[in-house]
Amino acid sequence: MIGPKFREAHPTSSLNDVVAAYAADLKAHGIDAREIERRTQLILGSKPALEADYWNRFYLDPSTKVNRGPNAFLVEMRNRQPGTALDYAMGEGRNSI
């Protein structure tokens, strides 16, 4: 990511400077101009949308090293009776299933 490196090298730069450098980096890597514009608008306009976009691209990229199979624990829990809460972050000694 260019942001932190750019900020370190140019501590007085504005967000627009960082975004312009990021866009130039994307262009140098052969990213389509429409995609560059889409990403820069996300950065400048909506942090939640930017975050969602990042993770969507991360998980949709076939080269990402991530387990794409179902979570075994949640698969095991799928046959529980409706109305019973599943505390996925159960603390030690708690059995609230």
Image: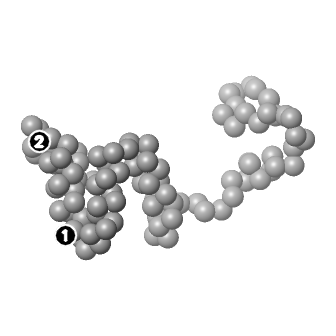
Q: Secondary structure at mark 1?
A: helix
Q: x, y percentage for residue 28?
A: 19, 70
Q: x, y percentage for residue 31?
A: 28, 70
Q: x, y percentage for residue 92?
A: 69, 27
Which residue type carries mark 1? Ala
In the foreground, 56 or 4: 56
Q: Which residue is mark 2?
A: 13
Can residue 65 be seen at all in this image of the molecule? Answer: no
Q: Measure the alpha-carbon separation of dots 1 and 2.
A: 21 Å
Seen in the picture, residue 56 relative to 48 is either above or below; the reply is: below
For this view, does 13 lie left or right of residue 89? left
Q: Could you tell me if the residues under marks 1 and 2 are in contact, i.e. CB atoms within 8 Å?
A: no
Can residue 21 be seen at all in this image of the molecule? Answer: yes
Other residues around mark 1 within 10 Å, as few (<14) / some (14–19) / many (≥20): few
Q: Which residue is mark 1?
A: 28
In the foreground, 46 or 7: 46
Seen in the picture, residue 82 relative to 35 is either above or below; the reply is: above
Q: Secondary structure at mark 2?
A: loop
Tell me which label, 1 or 2, sits earlier in the chain.
2
Q: Looking at this view, name the residue that lies furthest to the right.
A: 81
Seen in the picture, residue 80 relative to 37 is either above or below; the reply is: above
For this view, does 38 lie left or right of residue 20? right
Position of the C terminus by quadrant: top right
Other residues around mark 2 within 10 Å, as few (<14) / some (14–19) / many (≥20): few
Q: x, y percentage for residue 25?
A: 20, 62
For this view, does 39 lie left or right of residue 65? left
For this view, does 45 lie left or right of residue 54? left
Label placed on residue 65: none
Q: Looking at this view, name the residue that lies furthest to the top.
A: 93
Which residue type carries mark 2? Ser
